[in-house]
């Protein structure tokens, strides 16, 4: 089934088994890649977005939290399949958002941080977006920062800036 979301076409992702543990999709495998005799850790990605159950879909009545959650999970699995180690950080739209992002950034280091389109639009979320962006800039100064345009193009956003 196809839907239009923010000018992009979304297709319901295939059903894939996944386990949610808190805000993390996982557990992630030990992400190692071999190239000849050497191995190195996979690039680490943090995906920050709004918890789908807290988003306003009034402008997109055909879109549901379940559909968005399915796209998020499919993209995180796709990134893992591409060789990235991925952490998901789904936030509420209240004062806890900054604390959640801060805790994740203090716990781990990342090569790339993708910030979801739901934080940038609508304009009423501008302050929240700026707070999250500035937290990322301060706490992960060496990480590439990228943005998706829908829940269905997160992998492409990450691949524009880092390779696994």
Image: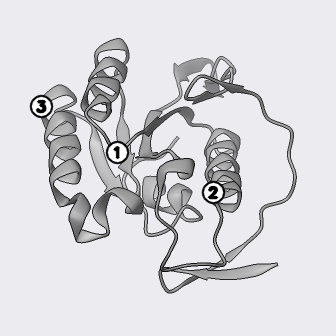
Relative vertical location of residue 136 with respect to residue 49 in this rendering, above or below: above
Relative vertical location of residue 72 with respect to residue 20 in this rendering, above or below: below
The colour mode here is one colour
Relative vertical location of residue 116 with respect to residue 122 in this rendering, above or below: above
Can you identify the residue that label 2 sits on?
65
- Identify the residue shown where x is 19% and y is 60%: 126
- Identify the residue shown where x is 62% and y is 44%: 76
Give how far across and how far down residue 121 sits, in percent. 32, 68
Can you identify the residue that label 3 sits on?
138
Give how far across and how far down residue 128 sits, in percent. 22, 49
Give how far across and how far down residue 94 sits, in percent. 30, 39
Can you identify the residue that label 1 sits on?
93
Give how far across and how far down residue 52 sits, in percent. 55, 51
Give the mark, 2 or 1, whose residue is nearer the N terminus: 2
Q: What element carries label 1?
A: loop
Structural distance between the alpha carbons of marks 1 and 3:
21 Å
Relative vertical location of residue 47 with respect to residue 161 in this rendering, above or below: above
**Front position among marks 2 and 3:** 2
Disc 3 crowd, CA 10 A, few/some/many (<14, 14-19, 20+)? few
Give the mark, 1 or 3, whose residue is nearer the N terminus: 1
Give the mark, 2 or 3, whose residue is nearer the N terminus: 2
Taking the image as drawn, is residue 97 in sight?
yes
Structural distance between the alpha carbons of marks 2 and 3:
31 Å
Q: What element carries label 3?
A: helix
């Amino acid at each position: 089934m196809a839907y239009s979301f923010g000018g992009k076409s979304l297709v319901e992702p295939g059903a894939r088994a996944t386990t949610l543990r808190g805000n993390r999709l996982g557990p992630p495998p030990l992400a190692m890649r071999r190239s000849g005799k050497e191995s190195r850790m996979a690039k680490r990605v943090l995906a920050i977005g709004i918890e789908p159950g807290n988003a306003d879909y009034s402008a997109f009545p055909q879109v549901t939290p379940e559909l968005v959650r399915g796209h998020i999970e499919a993209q995180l699995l796709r990134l893992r399949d591409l060789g990235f180690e991925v952490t998901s950080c789904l936030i509420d739209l209240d004062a806890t958002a900054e604390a959640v992002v801060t805790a994740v950034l203090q716990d781990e280091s990342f090569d790339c941080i993708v910030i979801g389109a739901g934080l940038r639009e609508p304009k009423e979320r501008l302050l929240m977006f700026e707070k999250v962006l500035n937290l990322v800039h301060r706490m992960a100064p060496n990480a590439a920062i990228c943005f998706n345009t829908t829940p269905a193009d997160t992998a492409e956003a990450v691949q524009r800036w880092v390779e696994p």
